[in-house]
Every structure is written in structure tokens, then in C-alpha cells.
Amino acid sequence: MSARAVYGIVAREFVRFLRQRGRVLASIGRPFVWLVFAGAGFAAVFAGRNQIDYRVYMAPGLLGMVVMFGSLLAALSTVTDREAGVLRMVLVAPIRRSTIAFGKTLGATLLGTAQALVVAGLLLPVVHLRPTLAGALLGLVAVVLSGLAMGALGLVLAASIRSIENFAGVMNFVIFPMLFLSGALYPVRHLGLVLRAVAYANPLAYGVDLLKHALLGAWAEAGYGGELPVPLDCGALVLFAIVGLALAASLLGREGGVTRTALRGRS
Amino acid sequence: MTAAAIDARGLGKDFGAIRALDQLDLEVREGEFFGLLGPNGAGKTTTVHLFATLLAPSRGTARVAGYDVVREGLSVRRSIGLVFQDTTLDRDLTITENLRFAARLWSLPERVARPRIDVLLRQFELLERRDDPVRTLSGGMRRAVDIARGILHQPRILFLDEPTAGLDPRARRSLWERIRALRAGSGLTVLLTTHYVEEAEPCDRVAVLDRGRLAALGTPAELKQAAGVRSLEEVFLAHTGHPLAETDGG
Ligand SMILES: Nc1ncnc2c1ncn2[C@@H]1O[C@H](COP(=O)(O)OP(=O)(O)O)[C@@H](O)[C@H]1O
Ligand SMILES: [Mg+2]
């Protein structure tokens, strides 16, 4: 694996992201919109019955959401790369398909992580959540592993979907179920059997669970902390990342990805 | 072990029912300036992509720089440069950023890449525009950056897939000068595809490709002599029974 090629791919993802002001602002502003609007509504519904302020309960979920948007949508660059032809240039470089997949996923992971760290720095003080050192470290692990799993998943979608329009459509279809079935807004254990089963096929659920272990330890007794064992959360996220990477690497090299666009561009 | 830069044996490619390339037997020699001449849809890009390991052959074999395109893809890609028919630059990045990105993909250390990029930018008269986004460049300039990108890692074999298509006559001439300068004094093997006879004329040897088949192969002089005609245009007509240029409005 060429470290320099991976670095080149990651660096380009960052440069492109930072030049898109709108994307940067949206990624930082989005969780606060949810905090204010969803937070206010749900807090009112649950008022008085809980030992936890709903906005505090939301914090890990919102961080998970930032990683999800950050790392999943990073895959957009792979779709635009295909349309602009850049992907062909990357494919003719003397590197393996798996190196490309790894570079793209690492870029997505670091983008998601950076966004989550910025948001955490703003959000946690707002909801008066002060994690312990161990909690903060576990939180970082949770963010990085979620980013890897989300980044790999995004890449699988981007490598199998040919146009930006389709990609946007599928993303909407993926993002919201993923968010609602992640435990970000309410505990997964309250869901019915079927939905709970779906939730456990959702990488974000493990990420959010891990973030609850990290940030809501003090409310674990009251039933608001993580529900699954920490090693299980980590293992599931790593598994999602590895399977996603392997799948994305084989999809990326498919020859249609290289020539179909060239044809479309000409006629 | 052959000294040929490119050696194709019975090479073919199908896309579903479309036979893009039938059975190509071709040898391109080390240091040769080789032209692949044919109209749109002849299979030129398919051929180049097969040599560059971007497509897998449906039949036959090919060795490029001595490496098998199926089993030794990485080694093939390490030996070649490819300027695609359509630009592959990132339009949002500057010229320098695009070249630096390519340098990293090709694993060039920064201390090697930086001076090389400077030299290429000077050579291609792009120094003043180096920090401008590619989207602000003219078509001719973009093409120049594409070529700079294609030779940055100093490949032994360079593929130019219709490098002048879509350029105005002046940009076309200056690009042509660049290609000439590039070859002068270097042992670079160049395989150029084109649908313009005047671009095939200066090639050492020309392969005429039509509907996925190799119709003729030889030096321009040989081809003309064998067909008893005076231009490559007529060579194409003699071998395929139809004119090379798409007829306009008729
Ligand atoms: N990815 C593809 N899928 C289907 N057909 C293709 C594909 N690529 C090329 N073709 C077809 O193969 C033939 C040769 O195409 P191409 O190699 O692009 O020709 P040229 O470069 O000489 O214009 C054409 O009929 C084209 O439509
Ligand atoms: Mg072509």
C-alpha cells in the first residue's frame, strides 16, 4: 500500500471540503438545529418522567449524526470524481484498488471525525455535559470507528450508483431510517422486535451506543447509557468497515466505472 | 522476452453484444511514434484502455513494457502514462494542486515532484496560471495540464488518446509542437490515437482501425505505396470501402 498515494487522496478530500463553505457550515449547524427543534419538542413530551434532560440524552446521538453526515456524504466526492473523469486518472495510477478504497474511506473518516470534534467542542458545553477523560477517549474511538464504517458504506453506495441524482435519492432513503433506528433520539430497546433487528443491522446504532457509553455513563443506572457491551459495539463497527472496504474495492475497479462516463460525456 | 514496448496477440474486447475490438495483433517498438488511426467508434479508446489495464480483455493477450496486462497490472501502470480523451483534471483544484495530487498517486517524493512540476509548467507556459483553478483555463491549457500530468512520473510509454480533439487549430498546433518536443531526445514510446490523417502522417508507423478491426499497418509511405494512393485518407478508403471523415451535411 502506498502511503503517499493514500495521503494524496486524503489531502484532496480535505481541500475540497474546506472550499465548500456551505457544506462546512451545514455540518456544524445541523446538530444545533436538531437540538433546538427536536430537542425542545421531545423534551416537552418527556418532561418530568426522566432523570435526564432530553437535550443531554440527545448529545451522543447528535455527535453520531455529525459523523454519519460527515463520513457518509464524503462519498459524494467519489460520485463526482466518476462524473468528472478524475476517477479514471486515479485508476490508471500504479496503486491497488484497495488502496484507493482505503484512501477514500480514511478521508471520509477523518472528515467525519474533524466535524464531530468541532461540534463536540461547541455542543457539550451548551448541554452542560462534561465527559471524564476515559469517556472522552472512548468517545474519540467511537467517532473514528463510526466514521470508518460510515465512510466504507458511503463508498459502497458511491461505487455502485452511477449518477449524482440517484446518489442523492438513495442517500435520503438511507440517512433518515439510519438516524431514527440508531438510538440517537430514543433508546433502541423501546423498539419492537422487527425494528430492533433492523437497528442492529445499522452501523450507526453501534456508534451511537458507544458514544452513550462514553458520554452518558452517569445515567447508565437510569437506563440511558449504552445498551450493548463496548467490545461488541467496536467489533461490529470494525466488521462493517472491513466488509464495506472489501466490497468498495471490488466495485471501484469495475470497468463500467471507467468507460461508461467517457461514452456519456461524448455524445 | 521481447523488446517490443507493446505486444498484442489476438486482443479483443466485447461490451455485451458490441464487438468493440475484434482480434488485434500489434507490435509497437521501443521508442516508436505509433499512430492508431480510425473514425469515431473504431475501437481506439478501447484499445488504449486495454493496454492501460483499465479494461479486461475478452480474448487474447497483451504485454506492455514487457508486463502482462491481466496478471501484472501494477507493473504495467507503473511504466505508462495515459492522457485520456476527456480531461481527468479536478476542475475545482488549481493546476499545481492537480499535479501535486498526481505526483502523490504516483508515489513521487515531494523533493522530486516539486522541481519537476516547475519545469513542466515552464515548458508548457503555464507558470502564471499555476494557482488558478482548472475550471478557469481554456481548453488548450487544460489539455497541456493533462499532458503534463501524464508525463510527470516520466513513463517509458505514453498513450495520447485523441489529444487534440475539441481544440481550435492554434491550440492544436501548439500542442503538436509540445508532443514533438517531448519525443525529441528521449527514448519515449508514444502511441497516439486520432481520427485526423494529418496527425497520423508524422508517425513512424500507423495502424488503421475500423469497426474494431485492424485494416492496415505500416509506415505512412508504405501504406500509400501498397494501396497505390497519395494520401492516408485514400489509404483508409481503399482498405475499408468508406471514407474516414464523417460526411458533413450529406
Ligand atoms: N463501456 C462501454 N459499453 C458499451 N459499449 C462501449 C463501451 N465502450 C466502448 N463501447 C463501444 O465500443 C465501440 C468502440 O468504442 P471506442 O473504443 O470508444 O471507439 P473510438 O475511441 O475509436 O471512438 C463503440 O461502438 C462504442 O460504442
Ligand atoms: Mg475514443
Image (tube, rainbow, N blue to C red):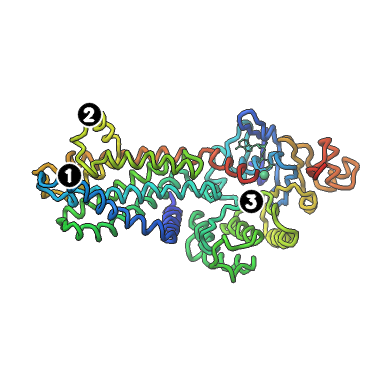
Of residues A194 and B138, the one nearer the viewer is A194
Q: Is residue B184 visible?
A: no
State the residue at coordinates (23%, 58%): A123
Q: Nearer the viewer, mark 2 or mark 1?
A: 1
Please report, as a chain letter, where disc 2 is located: A
Q: Amino acid at mark 1?
A: Val
Check if mark 3's residue and mark 2's residue have beta carbons within 8 Å: no
Please report, as a chain letter, where disc 3 is located: B
Q: Quadrant of residue B24?
A: top right
* Cα distance between the residues tagged 2 and 1: 24 Å
In the displayed structure, does residue B39 sit left or right of residue A125?
Answer: right
Q: Is residue B52 above or below residue A196?
A: below
Ligand 2 closer than 8 Å to label 3 CB: no
* Cα distance between the residues tagged 3 and 2: 61 Å
Q: Which residue is mark 3?
A: B157
Which mark, residue B69? none
Q: Amino acid at mark 3?
A: Ile
Q: How dense is the environment of label 2, judged by Cα within 10 Å: few (below 14), some, or many (20 and up)?
A: few
State the residue at coordinates (47%, 45%): A96
Q: How dense is the environment of label 1, judged by Cα within 10 Å: few (below 14), some, or many (20 and up)?
A: few
Residue A259: x, y in percent?
A: 58, 41
Look at the image and tell me in which quarter the C terminus of chain B lies: top right
Q: Is residue A66 visible?
A: yes
Q: Nearer the viewer, mark 3 or mark 1?
A: 1
Q: Which residue is mark 2?
A: A193
What kind of element bears circle 3?
strand
Q: Which residue is mark 1?
A: A45
Ligand 1 closer than 8 Å to label 1 CB: no
Residue A190: x, y in percent?
A: 18, 35
Which residue is the extreme one toward the right?
B228
